[in-house]
Image (cartoon, rainbow, N blue to C red):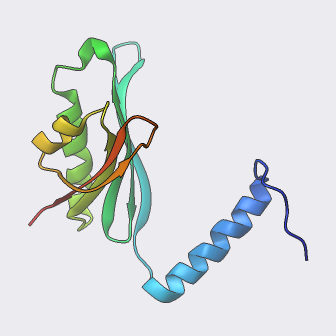
Amino acid sequence: MKLTQPLPPDARDLDALRIGLSGYNQAIAGTHLREQIASFIKDERGEVLGGILADIKWGWLHVDWLWIDERIRKDGWGGRLLATMEQYAGSKGITRFHLETTSFQALLFYQKQGYTVFGELPDMPPGHITYFLKKLQD
């Protein structure tokens, strides 16, 4: 056996890691819905002007990315994207949501959408704070 040096991973090695970890997790936590989902805002030419990427895993919806082009940022699209994901998750029985944002991104926006801070990581990135937020629906 040998320990490899830290390098960009090979796809086959990543698959082995994913399969091994997934098998362990499933043995301990059981089988749960796992799905990656996305929704986009597109103009009439099909150009993406915003979107959201999320994962459903272990009974939670996790928002990975949410971005809106500055030209349409104040038009309510962010709230609609977030609501679309939450509604989709709800159709699958998922009523718990979480995400991260930083001090220079959209903390107030997420709080207006009903998310609450449950943790902070200072100096991530340097000079800023990463906030961890959650939202639980009844």
Dividing the picture into quarters, in which one does residue 43 lie?
A: top left
Horizontal relation, residue 22 to residue 79: left or right: right
In terms of depth relative to the viewer, which is nearer, 72 or 105?
105
- Residue 95: % across, % down: 20, 64
Which quadrant, please, contains the N terminus?
bottom right
Horizontal relation, residue 30 to residue 81: left or right: right
Q: Is residue 56 above or below residue 71?
A: below
Q: Is residue 3 above or below residue 72?
A: below
Q: Residue at x 21, y 28 (%)?
A: 77
**Tally of numbered discs:** 0
- Residue 31: % across, % down: 44, 80
Which quadrant, please, contains the C terminus?
bottom left
Dividing the picture into quarters, in which one does residue 102 lie?
A: top left
In terms of depth relative to the viewer, which is nearer, 83 or 5?
5
> Is residue 40 visible from the viewing direction of this image?
no
Q: Residue at x 66, y 76 (%)?
A: 20
Q: Residue at x 25, y 58 (%)?
A: 97
Dividing the picture into quarters, in which one does residue 82 lie?
A: top left
> Is residue 125 visible from the viewing direction of this image?
yes
In terms of depth relative to the viewer, which is nearer, 69 or 31?
69
Q: Is residue 49 above or below residue 104?
A: above
- Residue 67: % across, % down: 35, 30
- Residue 64: % across, % down: 40, 46
Q: Residue at x 45, y 38 (%)?
A: 125
Q: Residue at the right extreme? A: 1
